[in-house]
Amino acid sequence: MCDSCAPSTEMISAEEVGGLSRRTLFAGLGLGLAIPAIGLVAGAPTASAASLMDGRWANPALGHFPQGGHFGASRPGGPHAGQDVTNSTGTGVYAAADGTVIRRAWGGGLPGRSGNGLVISHGHDQYTYYGHLNAYHVPLNAEVKSGQRIADMGATGNVTGPHLHFEVHSGGIGRITDPVAFMAKRGVDLGGGWPRIDPGSAGATVVALQHLMRKHGHDLAVDGKYSSAAVAAVKRFQSSKGLAADGQVGPATWPKLVFTLHEGSKGDHVKGLQAALNKRSAGLAVDGDFGPVMAKAVRTYQSTNRLVVDGEAGPITWRALLG
C-alpha cells in the first residue's frame, strides 16, 4: 500500500478552495504552472442529480483492501487521501466514469503523491485520481468512457507493493471525499461486489441488463435507459424468482439474471456479455454469437484481472465485468 499518499500539511478551508482562481486550481494539476502548497480538504458539496445516476460509474480495479489502506488512515504527512486496492502488477485499471484525462504525470501533479498517476475530469466539478501505475493506456487529453482500460496497476513511487491508489475529488480539485462511500452511492462496490442499478439509471451496465432481461422473455428495448417499462419488467422477474420486487438490480437480483456462457453459446444473454466486455474495452461486435474472438476476449479480461482463466463467463466473471 501507499507509504505516503497524504495531503500536504498546509491545509486550506472549503471557502478558500471555492475562491481559488482557475490558474491556481490548474496549477494543482500540474498543467505547466507552479503547484501551490495546499492540502486536500475532506468533504464535498452535494453533487448534481446527473452525477448521482448509477449505471454510469465503474469499479476502477479488482483486488482487495489492504489493512491501513482506507481513506483517512494515518500517514506521516496526514490522513490517507484515498482507497488502496491491492493486486498484482499489470492488473487492469479502468476509468471510474466518462471524462477527460487532464493530467498524466508523476503523482498526478498533486501535493503529497508519488508514482505514475492519472487525473480524470468527469464534469460537475468531479475528478478521480489513479496512482502508482505501472503503465499508461491512454494519452493526455484523451476522452475516456466509464469502464475503459486506462492503465496497469503497479508499484511506482513510495509504496510497499503493487496496488491502485484511488481518490475522488468532488466539488473541485482538493475537495477529497471517501471514495468507497462516493462510489457506493453511485451503485459501485469498490470491494468488487455486484453493482446496483436503480430506476432512472443509464449506461453500459443497463444495456447488459436489458439484453439479459430479453433472454428471460421480457421484450425490452435495448437503449441503455432504465425506464419505467424496464423497471416494471424487472419487478415481475424479481417476483417470479421469490425476490423483493423493488425494481433495484443489485446483489440479490444479478445472480438470478446472469448465465454461465462459453464458446458456442448464442442469444441475447451473449449480447449482454458482449456489452459488458465492451464496457471494459473489448471492442466486440454485439451479435449474440460466442465465437473464438469472444472467447479470447473473455480469457484476456480474466488474465488481466487475475481471475481463473478458462474462457467461460460464470458469475465471478460477470460480477467483475459489470461492477
Image (cartoon, helix red, strand yellow):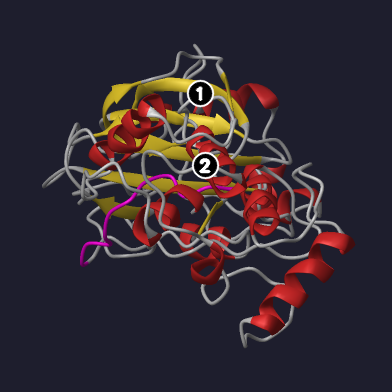
Spatial CA span between label 2 and label 1: 18 Å
In-front residue for pair 196/170 = 196
Say what secondary structure mark 1 lies in.
Answer: loop
Find residue 115 and report its horizontal and vertical position in percent.
25, 30
Q: Residue furthest left?
A: 160
Give neighbour class at mark 2: few <14, some 14-19, many 20+ (Cα, 10 Å).
some
Q: Is residue 54 magenta?
A: no
Badge nearest the viewer, 2 or 1? 2
User: In percent of the image, x 65 and y 62: which residue is there?
Assistant: 216
Find residue 61 and report its horizontal and vertical position in percent.
36, 46
Tell me if 154 is positioned left or right of 262 in this view: left
Above or below residue 39? Residue 193 is: below
In-front residue for pair 213/305 = 213
Indicate which disc residue 266 carries: 2
- Check contact, mark 2 vs mark 1: CB within 8 A: no
Dot placed on the residue nearer the N-terminal end, 2 or 1: 2
Q: Amino acid at mark 2?
A: Lys
Tell me if 232 is positioned left or right of 47 in this view: right
Read off the residue under disc 1: 283
